[in-house]
Image (cartoon, rainbow, N blue to C red):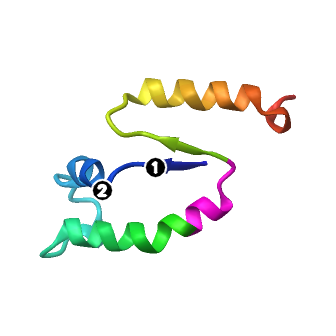
Amino acid sequence: MCKETALDQLYERTSRDRNRPLLQTEDPRGKLEELITQRDPLYREVADMVVHTDDRSIKSVVKEILVRLEQEPKYRN
């Protein structure tokens, strides 16, 4: 699963987190953009599903994931 979040949303979510060493730079937003550009194609290549998380609660995202998993035959018991 790949979680998709807009750059502005990621920056907002991570801007006060001091436990993210890669973002402890002069331009953390620019670093995030660089990381997205590098990593997003790789994440999508191996993901079975992509879930958009912008402006959504954790509960809403989890609910969508569970519904989509229930609908997918390969994830059923």
- Please give the name of the residue rendered at 46% of the width and 49% of the height, measured from the top-left corner: 4
Q: Residue furthest left?
A: 26
Image position of 27 (left or right of 55): left
Amino acid type of the residue tagged 2 in the rendering: Leu
Nearer the observer, 12 or 6: 6
Say the numbered circle drawn on residue 4. Answer: 1
| Number of marks in the rendered image | 2
The 10 Å Cα crowd at callout 1, few under 14, some 14 to 19, many 20 or more, is: some
**Bounds of the magenta segment:** 42-48
- Compared to 17, does 20 lie above or below? below
Whether 46 is among the magenta residues is yes
Quadrant in the picture for residue 77: top right
What is the quadrant of residue 75 in the picture?
top right
At label 1, which amino acid type do we have? Glu
Q: Percent x, y for residue 36?
A: 40, 66
Please give the name of the residue rendered at 69% of the width and 49% of the height, measured from the top-left corner. 48
Q: Badge 2 is on which residue?
A: 7
* Residue 22 picture location, percent across and down: 30, 72
Q: Are marks 2 and 1 in contact (CB under 8 Å)?
A: no
- Residue 51 shown left or right of residue 56 in the figure: right
